[in-house]
Amino acid sequence: MRLFFSSLFVCFIFFHQLSFGQTRLIIEDIKNNEGKILISVFESKKGFPDDPDESTQNFVINAKKGKISLELEKIKSDEFAVAVVHDENDNGEMDTNAFGMPQEGYGMSNLEKKLRTKPKYKNYAVASSQPEVKVKILYP
C-alpha cells in the first residue's frame, strides 16, 4: 500500500511539472485572412513589445478570420507578456503612420483598448500559471 501511494505521488509530481507553464494562447477578432499573424512572447521587459529578437518565443501564422489558438512552449519565468501584429500586407513588420501609431491590427496580453502611448511590460504581463491567455486584435 505504501508503494502504491509513493508511486501515485511520483506520478502526480511528474505530470504537474509537465503541465506547469504550459499555456494555450488564443488570438481573437482577426478581421480577415490576409497576411500573417506575428506573435512574440516576452518573459521580461527587455525588447517588449516591438523587438522580437529579445523575445523568448516567436510565431508566424497564416491569418485566419475569427480566431486562432496555439500552445506556447514552457514559460520559464513567473510571468510573460504577448505582443501580436496582424501583418496584413505581409511585409514582416507593423506599419505605422508619421506619428508612430499602428496602421495594422495589433494586440497584447491584458490589452483592453487602443494604445495611446508606448506599452510597458508590467501593464501587460500575465502569470505563467494561467492555462489560457486571450489576446484580442484591435484595428486602427
Image: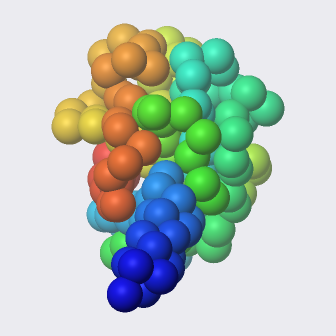
Residue 58 shown left or right of residue 13 in the figure: right
Residue 28 shown left or right of residue 120 in the figure: left
Asked if residue 22 shows in the view, the reply is no
> Which residue of the protein is positioned furthest toward the right in this rendering?
53
Closer to us: 138 or 122: 122
Closer to us: 78 or 27: 78
Closer to us: 119 or 16: 16
Q: Position of residue 11 (x, y in %)?
A: 49, 76
Q: Where is residue 67 in the image (x, y as percent from the top left)?
A: 38, 73
> Which image quarter is the C terminus in?
top left
> Which residue of the protein is positioned furthest toward the left in this rendering?
112
- Residue 108 in the image: above or below residue 88: above
Q: Give the residue at x 65% y 20%.
A: 47
- Residue 95 in the image: above or below residue 2: above
Q: Position of residue 86 (x, y in %)?
A: 53, 54
**Type of colouring:** rainbow
Residue 65 shown left or right of residue 114 in the figure: right
Q: Give the residue at x 47% y 82%.
A: 3
Residue 48 shown left or right of residue 5 in the figure: right
Q: In which quarter of the image is residue 133?
A: bottom left
Q: Quadrant of residue 89?
A: bottom right
> Which image quarter is the N terminus in?
bottom left
Q: Give the residue at x 34% y 60%.
A: 132
Q: Give the residue at x 55% y 17%.
A: 45
Q: Where is residue 43 in the image (x, y as percent from the top left)?
A: 57, 31
Asked if residue 40 shows in the view, the reply is yes
